[in-house]
Amino acid sequence: MIPLTIETDIVFWICGPLMVAGAFGLVLFRKAVYSALSMAFVMVNLAALYAAMGAPLLAAAQIIVYTGAIMMLFLFVLMLVGVDRADSLVETIKGQRVWTALAAIGVAGLIIAGIGHVAAASAGLDSANEAYGGNVQGLAAMLFNRYVFPFELTSALLITAAVGAMVLAQHARLTPKKTQAERAAERMEAYATAGVHPGALPNSGVIARHNSIATPALLPDGSISGESVSEVLLGRGAIVDTPALSALTAANFAGVAAELEGEEPPVPPALDTGPKPASLEGATPADTAELAPESGASDAAVEDEEESK
Amino acid sequence: MNIADPTFEWFALSPVLAVLAAACLGVLAEAFLPQKPRYYAQLALAEIGLLGGFALLVWNWSAAAVSASGAPQAVTGAKLAMGALVFDPPSYLFWGALLVFGALAVAVFGERAMTGATAFAASVSAIPGSQAEADAIAAKREHTEVFPLALFSLTGMMVFGSAGDLLTMFVALEVMSLPLYLLSGMGRRRRLFSQEAALKYFLLGSFASAFFLFGMALLYGYSGSFDFAVIDTSLATSEMNRGILLAGLGLMAVGLLFKMGVVPFQSWVPDVYAGAPTPVTGFMAICTKLAAAAGLARVFFVALGGERWSWQPVFAVLAIATMAVGVILALSQTDLKRLLAYSAISHAGFLLTAVVGAYQFVPEGQLNSLGAIFYYLVAYGFATIPAFAIITTLRDTSGGEATDLAKWSGLGKSNPLLAGIFSLLLLSFAGIPLTAGFIGKWAVFAAAWQGGFWWLAITGIGFSLVAAYVYIKVIVAMFFGEPAEGVQLGQASMLTWLPISLGAIGTLWLGLFPAQLMDLIAQAQVFVK
Amino acid sequence: MNPDLVLWLAAILFGIGALGLMTRRNALVAFMCVELMLNAANLVLVTMSNVHGGLDGQVAAFFVMVVAAAEVTVGLSIIVMVYRSRRSTSVDAANLLKQ
């Protein structure tokens, strides 16, 4: 293992404050994803500190196991349970936050006061590392000799974790899985009896500036097709207001046509006439400005939009 | 590089390995056996593992009690598995108690005669109230993983109480806790309660293990080793700042006292005891306490015994607070499971008085602090497992357990036998003479007194008198109250009746003839460093 | 280097973790705070390993990582189970057991 040549002190003074900042981020960010990323940031800095403190194996394990596996597991679960909800800041117990903060400062203060001054200078790891020819070898010698029993005992821990995750998450299938033929027959029957469209659902809308899955497709009469976007997005109301966009386009087009005929261009309607859903990337005032027919370039955009309809 | 081969004392390790092997075989059985015979295989495997482990332990003891020439000798201790475990006389005691109480508690896990199913959810992953759950119940699915999980937990408990170093202890702490978090969340009825109990237990439990770990790291910093014996010698020789020792001691105490359910770390106990499936509550109530008490005693008597002047006063205050909270809050409970949970908190306080005494070197044949703790726990175990088993037998009209205290009114008229046994157990909890609980209370208070904490012993006696009122109130309701409407006794099988009857016999026996067990304990109550 | 500073850093991180666990409502974030506390303990172990010139502390830190991985698996599956039942990971929503 190549020894890290930077002075430990320098690494400490860089990583230490960053770690404290990351830890505060973990506690203070309202969004759980930001908290998780702050935590990962703390862990990476900790790995750097380990490397500087003569623990190369732990530095690698910190990155691979902690940051790479454990934090990513957290992120997976965060994605599963919904990331867009910020934590409520309402205190359920009055004054709890102040008291807790005081208690935590007290705990940390007591520990720091207790640690005080260690009184012993670092003995360094050189002799311990040399005994078996290196840090990793030295750790292996302890792991497979002195600490072999707890090492084997961790297998019980890992089996418990695997069994537990399976018990809590796996749902045994009680009815046989439907074959493709049965599914097709069901679709056709639904079509015959209830008139449900048997084919695939329509795509989401592809319009000049918007082709995200949050953009509903427009039906020939100009209304949106609810089937063209995911039910989840519809439920959240997180879709782009396509009719408003197309109304703007139509107005622009009318304006261009009128200009060609030599008349004064009518003022384009304001975007927020209809009920505007809380959109992911909905039309903003900036969009409105860009869509205003002022130059040839925007004319081209208008034409594009027209074509896409 | 050449790593020396580790040596294992297989025969001495065999009680732990038997339980661990039964757990691993149980996981395999889960994977390969068809659904119908799985339940029977798992139950049999668990009981064989636990009773087999107990047989191996007795064999070990009888082999160690005879010298090479055939003459009887005192059992001494040995370090096992490269020093990770200490197989000293107290280890025999605690392992034996864990295996016996584990076998009784796991038998209650298997009870399904009363409702046609075990106390565990048909499908834990199905959302409560959903079609999937109804389907799983109709298909008579059941989670037989509970047996291996309980065995893993017991493995951890056995190692926890006999660990030779802090690192093994930390790993064992997690091995014993993780299955308990899972088991608490698997209740069949009132599933939201059960899941909430699991979440609460898990968050607070991992919080406590973080404290334990930080304390352990500081103790390592002070002494340069995880080994209890080395920590003990370093108390006098270390050149480190003593503040590190005190901070480490305090943080480790938080982690250990949490597992015991001592105030101010008791808040999880009522919620988890009430929310978890009742058989699991019985299992946790005694086995976790046994392991936690053994671990607490080992850390504070063996490793930190030389520092006792700094922890005894704090523990004395905590013991009084624990007894007070347990007893006073139990007075106002209307739910039987919660009442027994608060009673468990008060018992943790009574136990702690003996720890505070730290009375170790005694005349031949008397109980020291550790012996008193052990006697108390055996008495508590013989009362608490059947008590929770009896709670499972009274059912309301929907088939769920009737834990409301009002529903137990008048039970003495409809079923005098069951009500009589339950009264006996409650009297043992209260510490009334002629029951095991009385001898246990007498032993712990005597240990505190001998250790110089006479005022603590007197306070404890006061609280146990107040606590008696709680239990007698229940007994009076059972025998003199109007019979409650809408409840009936389930037709329990031997799996419930065996622990109930054995527990009742044990409670009476230890109350009337305590000498035998006391003699055994007196031979085996000194830790080996 | 001076081990005092690293130990103080570890104590600060531990305190911040404890603070977060007690104030944050989201069970996931609360659990991450526990992880922060475990990391702080690991930092103490590695530092003390340096001070004493023995590798026990590093081995212990290695064990803590294994234990944390298993604990996270169990913890997250419990959190997901609770979330599926009540569509919330807030510890305040879990109040059925309050008297």
Image (spheres, grey):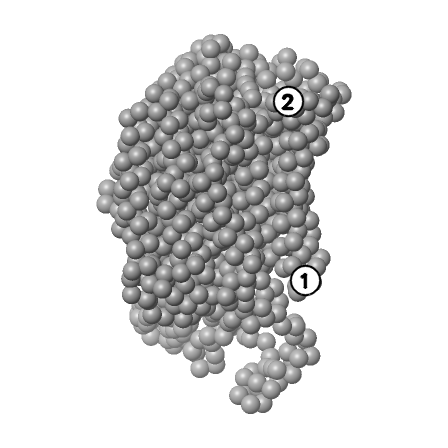
Mark 2 and mark 1, same subunit? yes
Which image quadrant for residue C69? top right
Q: Where residue A281 appears, x then y in whole percent?
A: 42, 60
Which image quadrant for residue A184? bottom right
- Chain label for disc 1: B
Q: How many marks?
A: 2
The one of B461 and A89 positioned closer to us in this rendering: B461
Q: Where residue B455 appears, x then y in whole percent?
A: 28, 26
The one of C93 and B307 positioned closer to us in this rendering: B307
Q: Is residue A3 visible?
A: yes
The single residue placed furthest to the bottom in the displayed view is A193
The one of B394 and B25 positioned closer to us in this rendering: B394
The answer to whether residue A78 is left or right of residue B88 is: left
CA neighbours of label 1 inside 10 A, class few (<14), some (14 to 19), many (20+):
few
The one of A156 and B396 positioned closer to us in this rendering: B396
Q: Which residue is rendered at x = 72% and y = 24% of the image?
A: B70
Q: Secondary structure at mark 1?
A: helix
Badge number at residue B15: none
The single residue placed furthest to the right in the displayed view is B2
- Chain label for disc 2: B
Q: Where residue B387 appears, x then y in whole percent?
A: 43, 51
The answer to whether residue A196 is left or right of residue C85 is: right
Q: Secondary structure at mark 2?
A: loop
The answer to whether residue A87 is left or right of residue B381 is: left
Circle 2: residue type:
Gln
Q: CA distance from mark 2 to mark 1?
A: 47 Å
B83 vs B259: above or below: above
Q: What residue sits right under mark 1 in the picture? A: B37
The answer to whether residue B67 is left or right of residue B447 is: right
Q: Where residue C70 appears, x then y in whole percent?
A: 56, 42
Q: What residue sits right under mark 2 in the picture? A: B73
Circle 1: residue type:
Pro
